């Protein structure tokens, strides 16, 4: 909101009328998993990505109407946490999901604590048959399928030339200690080099800009609530200066 953006959510619903260009829209793809809001059926990653495609096109209509110049200039930023980042990647990478027009309208993507290379517990990738908490979405074979990557891919953290990695920022958490999900079992099996759920080595996309904050995957002290992540977000979306640096370590003496 410091940059002129406004909410579009009011009276329990998203606005169905005209919207200003700088609008904050929440994609509530999980509502349908609740019987009070939807069918009670949890959407698959491709289903959620298809809905995101539909939403982007609908927003263009709400913002631009029939103004051809405005429609040509229309773009969106996608800001996603955890599995939401995989929904974004599925839209951008899977040629069978969404429509090209919606994909082309995505200017930048910012992910918080997204398991871009899946989730490992106790040193093993979670199995595809484990459906509890949708954990099977983070099995690398399943991910290769919905991200349209080659079968047998050992790593699935590549955009496969479907989207410019320079336009996708990865915010990585490094503090497992504050993640209390499953009574602390998650952080125990994820290990120290994680945010309590996603290991640091699995939280980035190949070739993408990234930053690290000593925050957990979610919760009161989670990465989404952190000032560090917010500052990286606004610099990535609105900054006009970029500096690339390389640190060369000649020696690392240990005690």
Image (cartoon, rainbow, N blue to C red):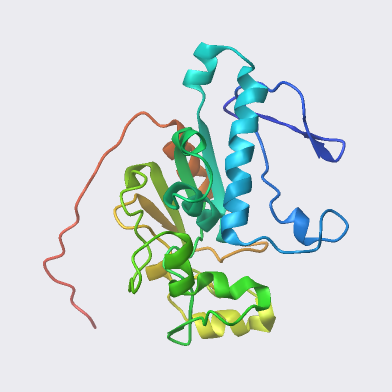
Residue furthest toward the bottom? Answer: 122
Position of residue 34 in the picture relative to residue 255 (left or right) = right
Is the N terminus in the top left, top right, bottom left or bottom right quadrant?
A: top right
Give residue 197's position: percent from left, percent from top.
54, 73
Is the C terminus in the top left, top right, bottom left or bottom right quadrant?
A: bottom left
Give residue 70's position: percent from left, percent from top.
53, 15
Q: Is residue 152 above or below residue 207?
A: below
Residue furthest toward the left? Answer: 250
The residue closer to the viewer here, 10 or 153, is 153
The answer to whether residue 187 shows anywhere in this view is: yes
Give residue 210's position: percent from left, percent from top.
38, 53
Instruction: Give the image quarter of residue 236.
Output: top left
Q: Is residue 57 above or below residue 61?
A: below
Instruction: Give the image quarter of residue 247.
Output: bottom left
Give residue 250's position: percent from left, percent from top.
11, 66
The residue closer to the viewer here, 175 or 76, is 76
Report the number of discs: 0
- What's the residue at 64%, 38% (across, down)? 55
Position of residue 11 in the picture relative to residue 92 (left or right) = right
The residue closer to the viewer here, 134 or 230, is 134
- What's the residue at 36%, 47% (across, down)? 162
- What's the residue at 57%, 65% (across, down)? 217
The answer to whether residue 228 shows anywhere in this view is: no
- What's the residue at 43%, 86% (across, down)? 123
Q: Is residue 145 above or below residue 12?
A: below
């Amino acid at each position: 909101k410091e940059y002129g953006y406004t909410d579009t959510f009011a009276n329990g619903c998203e606005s169905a009328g005209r919207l200003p260009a700088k609008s904050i829209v929440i994609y509530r793809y999980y509502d349908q998993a609740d019987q009070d809001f939807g069918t009670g059926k949890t959407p698959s990653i491709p289903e959620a990505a298809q809905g995101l495609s539909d939403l982007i096109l609908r927003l263009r209509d709400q913002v631009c109407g029939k103004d051809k110049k405005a429609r040509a200039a229309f773009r969106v930023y996608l800001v996603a946490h955890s599995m939401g980042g995989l929904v974004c990647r599925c839209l951008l990478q899977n040629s069978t999901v969404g429509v090209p027009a919606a994909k082309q309208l995505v200017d930048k993507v910012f992910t918080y604590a997204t398991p871009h290379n899946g989730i490992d517990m106790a040193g093993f990738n979670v199995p595809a048959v484990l459906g509890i908490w949708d954990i099977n979405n983070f099995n690398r074979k399943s991910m290769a399928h919905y991200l349209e990557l080659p079968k047998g891919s050992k790593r699935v953290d590549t955009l496969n030339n479907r989207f410019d990695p320079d336009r996708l920022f990865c915010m990585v958490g490094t503090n497992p200690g504050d993640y209390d999900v499953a009574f602390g079992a998650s952080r125990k099996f994820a290990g120290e080099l994680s945010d309590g759920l996603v290991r640091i080595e699995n939280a980035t996309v190949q070739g993408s800009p990234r930053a690290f904050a000593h925050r957990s995957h979610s919760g009161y002290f989670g990465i989404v609530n952190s000032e560090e992540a917010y500052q990286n977000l606004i610099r990535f979306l609105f900054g006009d200066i970029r500096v690339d640096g390389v640190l060369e370590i000649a020696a690392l003496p240990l005690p």
